[in-house]
Image: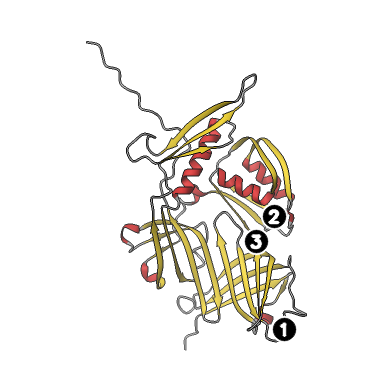
Amino acid sequence: MSEPRKARANLSFNGKNVTTTLEDYLQSVEYTDIADGSSDEISIEVQDSDLRWMNGWAPKKGDLISGKFQFSNWNQEGDNFNLTCGDFVLDQIKFNGGPRTLKMNAVAVPASASFKTRDRTKTWKKITIRKIVRQIARRYKLSYSYDAASIKITKLEQSSKTDCSFLADLCKKYGLGMKIFRNRLIIYDKGRYEKHASVATLEPKDFVDDDWDYDSDIQGTYTGCRITYKTTKKKKKKKSVSTYVGSKSENASGARTKKLNQQCGSVKEARLVAAAEVNRSNEQADVLSGIIMANSKICAASVVTLKGFGKFDGRYFIDKSKTGITAGGAKQSIEMHKVQTRIAATATKKKKKKKKKKK
């Protein structure tokens, strides 16, 4: 007799495994894995008909939660695997009556709450993004990884911003991804990750009940960016400088140019910022979302291949993955964008007009 497919959430609160204790109360657990822009999250819902959670078991903001999903006989008998969710800090507690339930939401941030709550003011001068990341990681006793080219910053103001929001804005400005996983700060080049090998091939039949949506829109996408900034040289007044980056000439037929004004310290910095702005906008040109059976290989920042979608076929980058376990089983909702040819942070060279030879 074959064993049934099974999904189970293994949870710990403040270092104590509560999986068995939760069995009679647990209604759902949902893990949200995000490639960039915000923290991973875990949401837990329990029933509280005996008021145990409102009394002795009442959780507190700041409690540490660790989670792992265990899958048994998933795609076939003997197909067992785990999905490690990571470590989280409880930041939202909500009780409801009729039926009485408790919903808990926790985010993946360092145990030190000041990373996300304490505003800091600092001027960063002549420094690389890698060194900024290292200094901030050390402040919160975080390990870190930096998988991107070296980017030099001439001058940058952190004005009354938390280190969390400052880093997120910095990465966004220069086209980098940022996430925290298991007390590790991860900074990466999104374009580099888009070139990784595909972890899975998805066809229409792989989406539960054919539940998927595809959106293709040229609105808000660009072929290039004209960026203007002011630079200050010794003994000279501020001077406006403008440069252009793009996949085609700025005045070419069909060109869609974004105009941008930013604070930059050099032409090289300005081109990096301009390219990052356009590439981020173009990620929304072709997007697909849908629900699949839980698959631990498909996670945020991984690449999958779509097949059987006609003109939509190709490589896609996973922006968000949300895996939920309930009494009815486990499903995974995913959001992805089609991998486009990224605009390089180099100026588009103008073609020189050939001089007519004198007869």
Q: Earlier in the sequence, mark 1 or mark 3?
A: 1
Query: 111 or 144, which is in the foreground?
Result: 111
Amino acid type for the residue under numbered disc 3: Ala
- Neighbour tally class for label 1: few under 14, some 14-19, many 20 plus, Cα within 10 Å: some
Badge nearest the viewer, 1 or 3 = 1
Percent across and percent down for residue 21 are 69, 81
User: Looking at the figure, which quarter contains the C terminus?
Assistant: top left
Badge nearest the viewer, 2 or 3 = 2
Residue lying furthest front: 98
Q: Residue at x 55, y 41 (%)?
A: 149
Identify the residue under disc 3: 108
Identify the residue under disc 2: 116
Residue lying furthest left: 359
Query: 254 or 340, which is in the foreground?
Result: 254
Percent across and percent down for residue 83 are 56, 68
Q: Gap between marks 1 and 3, in whole Å? A: 28 Å
Q: Is residue 305 above or below residue 275?
A: below
Q: Earlier in the sequence, mark 2 or mark 3?
A: 3
Q: Gap between marks 2 and 3, in whole Å? A: 11 Å
Q: 146 left or right of 51?
A: left
Task: Provide the secondary structure element on which disc 1 rests.
Answer: loop
Amino acid type for the residue under numbered disc 2: Lys
Identify the residue under disc 1: 51
